[in-house]
Amino acid sequence: MFRALFWVYRHTLSPLLHGFGVGGCRFQPSCSEYAEVAIARFGPWRGGWLALRRLGRCHPFSKGGLDQVPTADRS
């Protein structure tokens, strides 16, 4: 179900936002790709928390760059 939501976002809302001048993600992988991998790897609670933390780092003063999903649960 989550994968379908991310697919819909990437193919509908994301292009629409770019059309209105809202820039792309400053991180690699993109925030939606990061969230999809985090939820697949850690489940909806822990993965969702990691995705929210990532979104919190996405702001104009952030340098961005490479930010991979952790490979092990580091609580």
Image: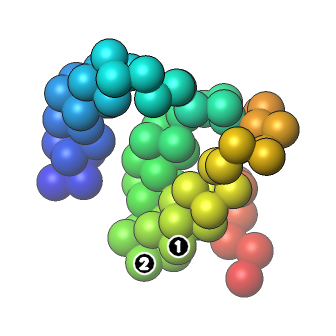
Could you tell me which residue is drawn at 75 percent across and 74 percent down? 74
Could you tell me which residue is drawn at 71 percent across and 63 percent down? 72
17 relative position to 35: left or right: left
Q: Is the residue 13 above or below the residue 40 in the image?
A: above
On the question of residue 41 being in view, the answer is no
10 relative position to 72: left or right: left
Give coordinates of residue 40: x percent, y percent. 41, 54
On the question of residue 36 being in view, the answer is yes
Q: Residue furthest top?
A: 19
Q: Write down the quadrant of residue 62 in the picture.
A: top right
Give coordinates of residue 1: x percent, y percent. 16, 54
Camera-near label (2 vs 1) is 1
Q: Nearer the viewer, residue 16 or 70?
A: 16
Mark 1 surroundings within 10 Å by alpha-carbon count, few (fewer than 14), some (14 through 19), many (20 or more): some
Mark number displayed over residue 45: 2
Mark 1 and mark 2 in contact (Cβ < 8 Å)?
yes
Quadrant in which the C terminus is drawn = bottom right
Could you tell me which residue is drawn at 45 percent across and 29 percent down? 22
Could you tell me which residue is drawn at 18 percent across and 42 percent down? 4
Q: Mark 1 = which residue?
A: 49
